[in-house]
Amino acid sequence: MRGTLPDRCGTFTIGGHPVTRLGLGTAQMSASGVWSHPTDAAEAARVLRQAVDLGVNLIDIAESSGPFNYEELIAQALNPYPENLLLMIKGGLLRSPDGQWEPVPRPSFLRKQIDTRLWYLKLNRIPLFQLHGFSPHAPVADQIGLLTDMQREGKIGQIGLAEVTVAELEEARKFAEIATVQAEYNLINRAAEPLLNYAEEANIGFIPWLPLATGALASQDGPLAELARRRSVTPAQLALAWLLKRSPAMLPTPGTLSMQHLNDNVSAVDIALTATEVDDLDRSIPRIDRLARSAQYWR
């Protein structure tokens, strides 16, 4: 590989902290991806360390990956943490006995979530905390107010939002500086395009979840297979290259439990798509426009 990762893919600044535009997610480190332990904890730790060695300094952790399984894993694998590492923690959901996800009913619940995750991560401050949607049981001002209170206490660095509309983002910005937003976005599903455009214009980082459409875009017989063969790259690399080309605010965090896939994903930053190739992808990939507004889709 040539040069360092920040030089090759560029950086995006979050609260004065430059992060590589290609990060790492943790949801795919287990067989189910939801509410489960890592499939192979030792291998997951190796992937985390290798990602940091390759220059990745943005790691995405969601509460839907499990009850603090990944916080424990990350603390074991990476603590003491590199100074330039930015951990992005999503929180604000509760899992019901029937497996459904709902926003926490009161800000006090959210404070307990954050304090518990700090303990598992062995941190005094979460660098970037993303609220996973707004609860209908409390005003937006109260929910954001709890996060700004915790900012002042030094327990949160930057505030982000996940699975919100443009209107909800605008409302939240009345009460706090919002550093990032996250929504499902990939070549197949671009329903969050208005949110992406707003984020780019406001200099807010946009983190696409399901960047490979749950593997559909990585398949060797999927919609990207032919162009990938012509370019001598993998379909997953092509999908990530398209995302990076789409916007300077785009910060994909693909997850994997494979060292080979990690190396392949990082190599995607070296793929320079031509305008013709981008047009071909835009025209040829079947698209859906589904906003992931139900908690059952949240990751």
Image (cartoon, rainbow, N blue to C red):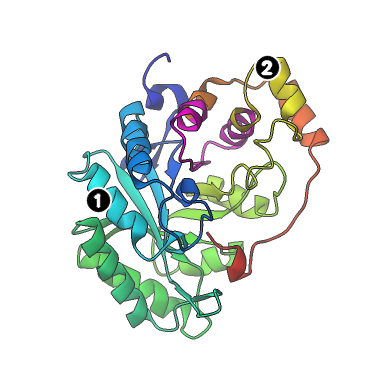
The type of residue carrying mark 1 is: Ala
Residue 178 or residue 256, whichever sits in front: 256
Q: Position of residue 224 (x, y in %)?
A: 73, 31
Quadrant in which residue 115 is drawn: bottom left
Q: Position of residue 23 (x, y in %)?
A: 43, 39
Q: Position of residue 172 (x, y in %)?
A: 47, 68
**At 69% across and 23% down in the image, what residue appears?**
228
For label 2, the residue is: 231
For label 1, the residue is: 75
**At 68% across and 61% down in the image, what residue appears?**
291
Asked if marks 2 and 1 touch (Cβ < 8 Å), the reply is no
Instruction: Provide the secondary structure element on which disc 1 rests.
Output: helix
Task: Specify start and end residues of the magenta stretch as a single range.
Answer: 238-265
Residue 168 or residue 260, whichever sits in front: 260
Residue depth check, mark 2 versus mark 1: number of the one nearer the observer: 1
Residue 75 or residue 145, whichever sits in front: 75
